[in-house]
Image: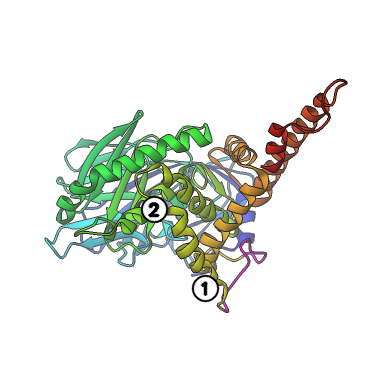
């Protein structure tokens, strides 16, 4: 199947504006497949485009009330022509559960044969479980309806409600990129909490229940302290409502920053005594995913070439903000573990610029999830903060979030915002200096101004 190129994405983003998805899932039809009905509302300014879907079997497609031949599907792309100003596409498909951690993953717990599902949509996995315009800069609001066994719970990017036994609704989300959409379903053990008006949740498979219960205070405390610090730094409250942290089986990465419903590898539910360093590392991963809620989720890169900025920012913020928790050693870890990861990645033939010039397609971008995009990039951001001064950096970040909330922005726009902040700050300092050299006053900069200039 062809991967989406930046050119494909640019043309499609100019052609369509996606408003809403309603995704209906029937998870009761067997162990191999499930049914997915994707209803997409979008406006268009071109005659044709395509939607991404990778089904086991495409059952029925209706476009603006007319049937579309399902044999038009070609290598994961369903062409659409005769677009109107406003359109409704309904795609009904039998989809396969995945077993490689991408798409809608289905795992049978070897401990007790219970079945657990979770959706993983990054980087190009969303069409493996629903039809969509799969690129970061086509954001839309999502509502989900889910049919599942009666003893399951369902979680997602918005508040989930059990409307009757075995039937759940997930309320409309904020605008999300396709790669953030998740659906968690199964007989998960769930623990609820609350902090500063934000409903909190932890969940894991039943066989890990006692271990998660033992660590719930640590996890909730780290989460609460990080929320307080992010609210203080960003001056912009967490925008996605509830905040669930779900520890899932057979996960490919450390964690995924799905807004409102972060998924973590359940190896992070400790099953025996662990070191203080392991607890610190887990706290940083919790705090890293939280940073993405602002930088990555509320404001998202336009294309994958800015992936490094997303990850470097979260990496930098995790090492900084974790210092408000009881866990220690964060900058030491950065200097002696994470930066080494970056240095080693830099010595390989696969090394690349932190901010790559070459724009890769959606699949090749996976190659850049490495020590350069995370740790070396975070070291560069740390230098930038020192160069600009913390106040200018945070003002720039906040202006960036305000200007692009629930939208997309690229590196150039971020740098422009920081540059503007720096210019404004310099002008303020110049005015303060001029005021200081009025007659009768010592013309030398005051210590306070020297401190500002050194920042
Ligand atoms: Zn991340």
Q: At which x and y percent is residue 271?
A: 19, 59
Q: In this view, does 145 lie to the left or right of 403?
A: left
Q: At which x and y percent is residue 451?
A: 68, 38
Residue interval drawn in magenta: 349-359
Q: Does the residue labelled 2 lie within 8 Å of ligand 1?
A: no
Q: Is residue 187 magenta?
A: no
Q: Mark 1 points at which residue?
A: 344
Identify the residue shown where x is 25% and y is 50%.
185
Identify the residue shown where x is 57% and y is 38%.
401
Numbered circles on residues, count = 2
Whether residue 67 is visible, yes or no, is: no
Mark 2 lies on a secondary structure that is helix
| Mark closer to the chain start, 2 or 1 | 2
Q: How far apart are marks 2 and 1 (CA)?
A: 21 Å
Label 2: few (<14), some (14–19) or many (≥20) C-alpha neighbours in 10 Å: many
Residue that protrudes farthest toward the right in the picture: 439
Q: Is mark 1 within 8 Å of ligand 1?
A: no
Label 1: few (<14), some (14–19) or many (≥20) C-alpha neighbours in 10 Å: some
Whether residue 352 is visible, yes or no, is: yes
Q: Mark 2 points at which residue?
A: 285
Of the numbered discs in the image, which one, if any, rests on residue 100?
A: none
Q: At which x and y percent is residue 183?
A: 33, 49
Q: At which x and y percent is residue 9?
A: 60, 56
């Amino acid at each position: 199947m062809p991967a989406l190129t930046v050119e494909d994405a640019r043309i499609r983003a100019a052609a369509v504006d996606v408003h809403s998805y309603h995704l209906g899932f029937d998870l009761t039809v067997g162990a191999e497949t499930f049914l997915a009905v994707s209803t997409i509302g979008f406006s268009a300014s071109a005659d044709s485009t395509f939607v991404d879907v990778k089904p086991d079997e495409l059952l029925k497609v209706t476009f603006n009330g007319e049937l579309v031949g399902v044999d038009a599907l070609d290598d994961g792309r369903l062409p659409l022509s005769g677009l109107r100003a406003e359109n409704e596409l309904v795609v009904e498909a039998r989809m396969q559960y995945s077993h490689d951690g991408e798409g809608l993953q289905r795992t049978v717990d070897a401990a007790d044969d219970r079945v657990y599902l979770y959706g993983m949509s990054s980087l190009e996995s969303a069409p493996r479980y629903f039809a969509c315009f799969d690129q970061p800069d086509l954001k839309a609001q999502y509502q989900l309806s889910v049919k599942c066994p009666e003893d399951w719970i369902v979680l997602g990017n918005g508040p989930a409600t059990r409307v009757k036994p075995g039937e759940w609704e997930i309320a409309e989300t904020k605008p999300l990129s396709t790669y953030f959409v998740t659906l968690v379903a199964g007989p998960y053990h769930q623990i609820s909490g609350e902090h500063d008006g934000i409903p909190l949740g932890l969940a894991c498979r039943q066989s890990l229940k006692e271990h998660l219960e033992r660590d719930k205070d640590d996890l909730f405390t780290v989460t609460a302290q990080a929320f307080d610090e992010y609210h203080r730094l960003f001056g912009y409250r967490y925008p996605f409502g509830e905040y669930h942290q779900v520890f899932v089986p057979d996960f490919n990465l450390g964690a995924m920053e799905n807004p409102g419903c972060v998924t973590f590898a359940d190896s992070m539910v400790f099953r025996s005594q662990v070191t203080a360093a392991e607890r610190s590392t887990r706290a940083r991963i919790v705090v890293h995913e939280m940073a993405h809620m602002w930088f990555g989720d509320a404001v998202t890169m336009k294309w994958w070439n800015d992936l490094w900025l997303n990850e470097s920012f979260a990496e930098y913020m995790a090492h900084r903000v974790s210092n408000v928790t009881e866990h220690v050693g964060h900058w030491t870890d950065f200097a002696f573990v994470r930066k080494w990861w970056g240095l080693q990645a830099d010595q390989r033939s696969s090394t690349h610029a932190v901010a790559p010039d070459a724009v890769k397609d959606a699949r090749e971008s996976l190659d850049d999830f490495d020590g350069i995009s995370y740790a070396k990039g975070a070291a560069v951001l740390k230098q930038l903060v020192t160069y600009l001064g913390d106040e200018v950096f945070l003002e720039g970040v906040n202006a960036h979030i305000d200007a692009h909330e629930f939208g997309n922005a690229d590196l150039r726009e971020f740098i422009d915002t920081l540059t503007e902040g720096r210019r404004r700050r310099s002008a303020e300092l110049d005015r303060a200096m001029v005021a200081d050299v009025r007659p009768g006053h010592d013309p030398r900069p005051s210590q306070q101004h020297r401190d500002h200039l050194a920042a």
